[in-house]
Every structure is written in C-alpha cells, then in structure tokens.
C-alpha cells in the first residue's frame, strides 16, 4: 500500500538534501541560478540569498526538517502524520514564496511553483496509491492480493445487478463507512480505507454489533458484494429440464379463454392445474418467475428468491422471510422435505372450520401428493457429514429418536444443492412432478408473466396478464389464486376480491428458524450429502423441531458476517464447519402489505418463541461439542456468539435469548388468507362464486411441519372439487 507515494517521497528527500547542500555551500550562486531560471520564464527581479541573515538560517533549518519528514514518509508510507506535516510544510512555503513574489520580486514565483509542484506530486501519488474501501474490505475478507482487481470488477458487476435504488445507495453507504465511521466509532480522522488491519477489523466489529439496527444493516450492505464476489462458486453441471424450450410459445400465443386460470405454479398451483388438465379441462398457469436452471448458489438466490432473499420484517430487522419465485414456486428451491401435518394441528383446523381433516378427510389427497412426488426415506449413506456428527452427538448425550426425513427425491444422489435447483433433476419439485404432464395434457404455462388485474363477471373471471409481449386479457370460468402467502394478499386487496379482502395479509404465520456452526478441525465437509436429511423433536420442547441444513459458503457468509466477531477465521475454515438448524411453530402473528407494488412484512418474534429457539440452540451446541467440536458459533447479535466447550454450552440459559439478540429466518409463510376468514373450507373466496385461493395463505394455523405436502393435498382436493362443479 502507498508504494508509489513511498518512492516519490524518497526522491524528494534526496532533492531536499541536495538543495540544502547547495544552500549551505554556495548560497549566492544558488540564488543567481534561480534568478536566471526565472528570467527565462519572463519573471523580473532578483532572488538574493545571503548567508549572513536570519532568513538564511531558517531556510537551512526548514530544509533539514523537510529532508527528515520526506525520509520518514518514504520509510512508513502508510503512516499519515509525516505525510500531512510534509504536505502542510510545502503548502506554507508555497504561500510564503507567493507572498515574496507579490511584495518583493516576481522572480520568486519560480520558487513558489517548485514547492507547489512538490506538494501536488505528493498529494497525487498518495491519492493514486490510496486503496478504496471496497479494496480493503476484499483484503479483510481474505481475497488474495493478486486477485483483488478481478474481484473489484466482480463487485462492480454485482452492484449493477441491484435494483436502481440499491445501486445509488451503495456508493453513499461506502462513503459514510469510509469517512465518518472511523471518526464516530474510533475517534480518528483517518479514513477507513487507510486504517491498519487491526483497527479496520475493530471498526467492522463495532459496525456489525452496533445497537442501531440501521448501522448493522449498512455494514452488511457494504460487505455483501465483496463477500459474494470472493465466495462465488462455479455453477454445477445440470440435467436437461422437460419444460425447457416448451414455454416460450405459450407466452407468445396465450389463450383468450380457458376453463380455469391458475396464478402461481408452486405447491398450490401446479397440482390443481395438473388435476384439471388431466381431466380434459382447458387450464392456463400464470407464473411470474422462470425455470430454475442450476447455477451458482448466490445466482439462484438473486434470480429465484423473493427480494433476493432479503425480504426483511420491518418491525424486527433481524428476521428474514424466505420464499421462491419461479416455475415450480418455492418447491424448486426448498429442501425437498415431505412431512404430513401433525394430527393435533389438523384438529385445531377442524375446531375452527367444522371439517374432519384430523379424522382422515385429507388422507386420499395426501396419499396422491406423496405418490406424485415419489416420497421416500433416503438411505443414511446420503446424509451430510453435519447430520452424521449431530446424530453422534445426540447419542453421546444419551438422546434417541433422530430420524431420516422423507423427501421428494427418490433418485437422490446427494449433490447437496436442494435449495439452489437440483442439478440432477432428482428432486421432484412441482415443475417436474406435475407441470410436464399438465402441459402434455394441453395446459398453458405463461412464465415470466404477471397477473395485475382481476375482474369477476356474471359467468366468467377476467385476468389482466402482463409480460414481455405487453398486456392481454385472459377470461376463465374459474380462477385459482396460488401466488403464495406473500403475494396472494396483494392480489386480493388490490382488486378488492371477496367480502373480506381487507382481512387479506393479516395473521401471517411463519416457522422461525436459525442454525449454529461448529468447527471440527479435520472435517472436510464438502458440498455432498443431503443438506436437510435428519430431524429430531425434543420431547420436552413440543413446538421445536431440529432439522439439518448445510449451505454453500457464499450463502452462509452473510449470516457469518452478521454474527461472527472474526468473519475471516470462520470463512477460511468453512469446509471444516458442520451446521444444524432449529425451527419452531410460532405463537406470534404478523402482516403482509404492499408499498409501490412490492411486499413488506410486519413481524416481531415472540419472547417465548425466542426462548424456544434458545433452548434448541443450546441442545444443538451440546450435541456438537459432545461429537468433538472445538468451537461453536451461535446466531446471536450483540451478545457472546462463540463457545469453546461443552461447559460453556451448558451455561446457556433459554431466557437469555431475546428477539433483539437472535438472527432468524422465517420459512413457510402462511395464514394470510386463512380458511374461515377470507376463504371457506373449500377454498372459495367468501363473497365470490368463481375465485378460489390455494396456497399456504389459506392455513388457519400452522400444520406444524414443512408444509408443501399439506398444500399439495389441498390443491388436489380443490382440483377434484372444481371438476365436479364444472361437470355438473
């Protein structure tokens, strides 16, 4: 750093020394030489230097000081004090010579110009050498020095992919952190880009643990592009998709009238579309997203996660709500876990709706959903190393009952990328399990198309569809809204659909989840193995489920950046980290609302839910230490996040975990158009005859498990119900 400045300062130290020698030995001749040089430039007057006056002595003293300052600057170019003193001295001498040129003789302008040139060269060399804040962040994260230019270009490309507002804000955030954060947090006038490594590390720790949420978010925002650039992995090889090349024609030549239009192609939309298409009805599926083709994990998050995986609850700022946006919906980027709803949860539904779900009313469609998905329990050999270590830890603690999770991947090869598009096509998300057969039966899939208007007529429903070809109107006998618990409320409220459209968006439920990282020195985890293959339900914690989750380094890095006091240490050892997750059935409710057509979330974690998560975190910490972990990282903010022994893990108390101290992801959003409130038990929007809702938003309460099988069963049930209505 500052190599060019160091060289320039060394050159000037030699020049200053030579000038000092000339002044000492031949002061008169030196003055005559300067006078002649000034005359060649048309500057009149004489520069007189006499060896018997006070000015001469002061000039020699100043020159000696300048030699020393220049030498110190050249020896320690990163040190700012010699630079600023040297620059100030040359600035003052320039001003002094300018005064002499005005008051005594114009020839002095030659000296003013020389000193001004020295000051300018020092300033320009240091500015040229000064690293940018992004450069320092890349080095702090661990980017090799010879790769930093390439990473800088990658950071620029990454920022250009952001939305316009974020692109404009990013340089401003960097400027604030570079110029003002060191002054306000460290009490130094030095820029962040000029801090020594130790002080920069301390500054970033202060920013990431600041009591103001906005400061923590600004630090994360500044770190994200450099982290993503350094941790971006190569995309995996991918299998051909059965829908590839078949959907463009559907969007170019959409139908004008169908029996049933379905908005959304995930767990709620695809099964009902398949069911009706296979019965001979004309079906069109409107999907805002595109096909998921396996890519680098961060690229999948960018393309197919709602709000790039950064849909944050505005009330807590520590809770991210996750959902997918693609042909196949969230099923394309989930873990593939397939569990039937808990009977006690279905009983709660029955108590509200007067149904018989808990007594088996839903079973025929649950069976069909599992058959279409090919639900199987994978062999233990496919479990990730994280899951195996965690299970070993449970056994060491004397805890039994861990189970392999059934999944929708009968031919799973353990690629370890379930949440980022299965590269082998083994995971039967709805774009593979339902939609190809629906298309074969004559259904249209309008991908990259948005439903922006709904109007109900006497004998049909009109849907305004917007895509690259413009806007067109699609009329249908029945409309099924299956846009998910985040987007369905906006469609209902914007178009005032039904009698209780104002209720849409309220009573949002999620499954709050988080995870811990454990360091095993010789683990060599790798990406292979089922990321979420093992489950465990602690008997003493009825609302808590522990499930495995291991993700690529680039996806885990933002979480590490938020909770780790030593980010680089954990990133450098990521292949030796095991991880496991905890999920709870929440007590709290929130709300989804729209601003400018974009979804926003109001949700604050309940205090008891935070304690349940804390109890799960303590159990995971004990299990990993029992399995031989040397160090553990907790998902906590502004409290100790690192543990080094089983003794420390057992000192954790559940009540110490509060909503403000936990970093939480909210999975499986649901309940925002619940049965009994916005729709009836048959999923018809109350107050309409031809509009239905079928996605997780219709849940009156949580099913207690990963919900995709429950949603698909309700969707298949709705398909049979609509078929009977249209055949009557």
Image (cartoon, rainbow, N blue to C red):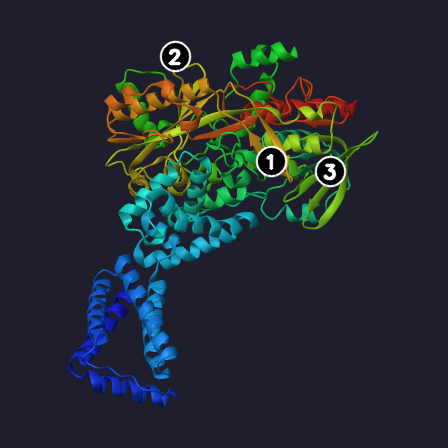
Tell me which label, 1 or 2, sits earlier in the chain: 2
Q: In x, y percent, where is residue 290?
A: 59, 44
**Tag 3's secondary structure?**
strand
Q: Earlier in the sequence, mark 3 or mark 1?
A: 3
Q: Secondary structure at mark 1?
A: strand
Count the labels in the image. Answer: 3
Query: Which residue in the structure is indicated by mark 3?
Result: 453
Foreground tag (3 vs 1): 1
Q: Residue at x 21, y 85 (%)?
A: 28
In the rendered image, the quadrant that contains the N terminus is bottom left
Which one is in front, 140 or 671? Answer: 140
Of 160 and 108, nearer the camera is 108
The furthest residue to the left: 25
Q: Is 262 situated left or right of 538 in this image?
A: right
| Camera-side residue of 280 and 124 | 124
For the question of whether residue 638 can be seen, the reply is yes
Label ID, residue 599: 1
Q: Is residue 538 left or right of residue 271?
A: left
Q: Are marks 3 and 1 in contact (CB under 8 Å)?
A: no
- Examine the rendered structure and indicate whether residue 73 appears above or below residue 453: below
- The x and y percentages for residue 31 are 25, 84
- The residue beneath circle 2 is 540
Counting residues from the start of the chain, the first of labels 2 and 3 encountered is 3
At label 3, counting other C-alpha atoms closer than 10 Å, the crowd grade (few under 14, some 14-19, many 20 or more) is some
The Cα atoms of the two marked residues, 2 and 3, are separated by 49 Å
Task: In this rendered view, identify the residue nearer to me: 662 or 549.
Answer: 662
Quadrant of the drawing holding the C terminus: top right
Rendering quarter of residue 363? top right
- What mark, if any, has residue 67 been given in the picture? none
Instruction: Tell me which residue sits at (38%, 18%) in the image.
Output: 655
Where in the figure is residue 26, as x and y percent of width and height?
Answer: 18, 84
């Amino acid at each position: 750093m500052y190599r060019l400045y160091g060289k320039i300062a060394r050159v000037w130290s030699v020049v200053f020394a030579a000038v000092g020698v000339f002044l000492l030995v031949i002061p008169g001749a030196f003055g005559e030489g300067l006078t002649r040089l000034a005359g060649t430039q048309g500057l009149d007057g004489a520069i007189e230097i006499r060896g018997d006056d006070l000015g001469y002595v002061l000039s020699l003293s100043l020159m000696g000081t300048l030699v020393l300052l220049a030498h110190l600057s050249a020896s320690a170019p990163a040190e700012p004090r010699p630079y600023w003193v040297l620059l100030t001295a040359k600035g003052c001498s320039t001003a002094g010579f300018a005064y002499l040129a005005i008051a005594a003789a114009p020839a002095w302008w030659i000296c003013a110009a020389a000193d001004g040139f020295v000051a300018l060269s020092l300033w320009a060399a240091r500015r040229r050498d000064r690293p940018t804040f992004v450069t320092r962040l890349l080095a702090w994260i661990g980017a090799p020095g010879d790769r930093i230019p390439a990473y800088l270009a990658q950071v620029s490309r990454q920022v250009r992919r952001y939305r316009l507002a974020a692109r404009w804000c990013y340089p401003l955030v960097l400027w604030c952190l570079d110029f003002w954060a060191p002054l306000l947090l460290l009490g130094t006038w030095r820029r962040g880009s000029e801090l020594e490594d130790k002080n920069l590390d301390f500054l970033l720790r202060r920013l990431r643990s600041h009591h103001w949420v906005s400061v923590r978010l600004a630090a994360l925002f500044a770190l994200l592009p450099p982290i993503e650039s350094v941790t971006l992995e190569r995309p995996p090889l991918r299998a051909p998709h059965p829908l590839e090349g078949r959907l463009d024609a559907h969007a170019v030549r959409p139908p004008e009238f169908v029996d049933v239009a379905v908005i959304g192609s995930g767990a709620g939309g695809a099964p009902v579309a398949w069911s009706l298409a296979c019965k001979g009805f004309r079906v069109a599926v409107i999907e805002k997203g595109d096909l998921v083709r396996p890519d680098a994990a961060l690229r999948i998050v960018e393309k197919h996660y709602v709000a790039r995986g950064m849909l944050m609850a505005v009330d807590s700022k520590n809770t991210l709500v996750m959902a997918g946006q693609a042909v196949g919906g969230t099923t394309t980027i989930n873990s593939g876990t397939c569990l039937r709803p808990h009977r006690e949860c279905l009983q709660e539904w029955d108590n509200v709706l007067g149904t018989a779900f808990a007594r088996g009313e839903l079973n025929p469609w649950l069976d069909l959903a599992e058959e279409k998905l090919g639900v199987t329990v994978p062999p233990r050999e496919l479990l990730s190393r994280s899951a195996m270590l965690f299970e070993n830890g449970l056994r060491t603690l004397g805890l039994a009952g861990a189970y392999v999770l059934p999944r929708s991947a009968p031919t799973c090869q353990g690629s370890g990328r379930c949440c980022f598009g299965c590269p082998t096509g083994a995971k039967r998300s709805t774009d593979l399990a339902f939609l190809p057969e629906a298309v074969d039966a004559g259904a249209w899939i309008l991908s990259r198309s948005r439903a922006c208007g709904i109007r109900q007529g006497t004998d049909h429903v009109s849907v305004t569809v917007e895509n690259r070809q413009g806007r067109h109107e699609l009329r249908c006998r029945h409309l099924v809204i299956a846009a998910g618990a985040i987007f369905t409320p906006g469609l209902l409220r914007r178009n005032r659909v039904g009698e209780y459209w104002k209720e849409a968006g309220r009573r949002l439920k999620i499954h709050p989840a988080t995870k811990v990282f454990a360091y095993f020195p010789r683990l060599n985890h790798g990406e292979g193995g089922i990321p979420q293959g093992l489950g465990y339900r602690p008997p003493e914690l009825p609302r808590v489920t522990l499930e495995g989750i291991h993700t690529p380094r680039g996806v885990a890095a933002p979480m590490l950046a938020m909770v780790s006091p030593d980010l680089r240490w954990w990133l450098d050892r990521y292949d030796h980290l095991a991880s496991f997750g905890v999920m709870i059935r929440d007590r709290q409710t929130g709300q989804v609302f729209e601003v400018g057509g974009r979804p926003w979330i109001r949700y604050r974690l309940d205090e008891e839910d935070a304690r349940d998560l804390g109890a799960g975190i303590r159990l995971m910490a004990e299990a990993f230490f029992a399995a031989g972990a040397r160090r553990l990282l907790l998902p906590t903010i502004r409290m100790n996040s690192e543990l080094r022994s089983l003794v420390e893990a057992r000192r954790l108390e559940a009540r110490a975990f509060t909503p403000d101290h936990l970093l939480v992801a909210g999975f499986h959003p649901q309940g925002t158009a619940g049965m009994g409130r916005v729709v009836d038990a048959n999923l018809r929007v109350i107050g309409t005859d031809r509009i239905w809702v079928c996605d997780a938003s219709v849940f009156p309460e949580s099913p207690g498990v990963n919900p995709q099988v429950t949603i698909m069963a309700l969707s298949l049930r709705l398909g049979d119900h609509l078929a009977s209505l249209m055949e009557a």
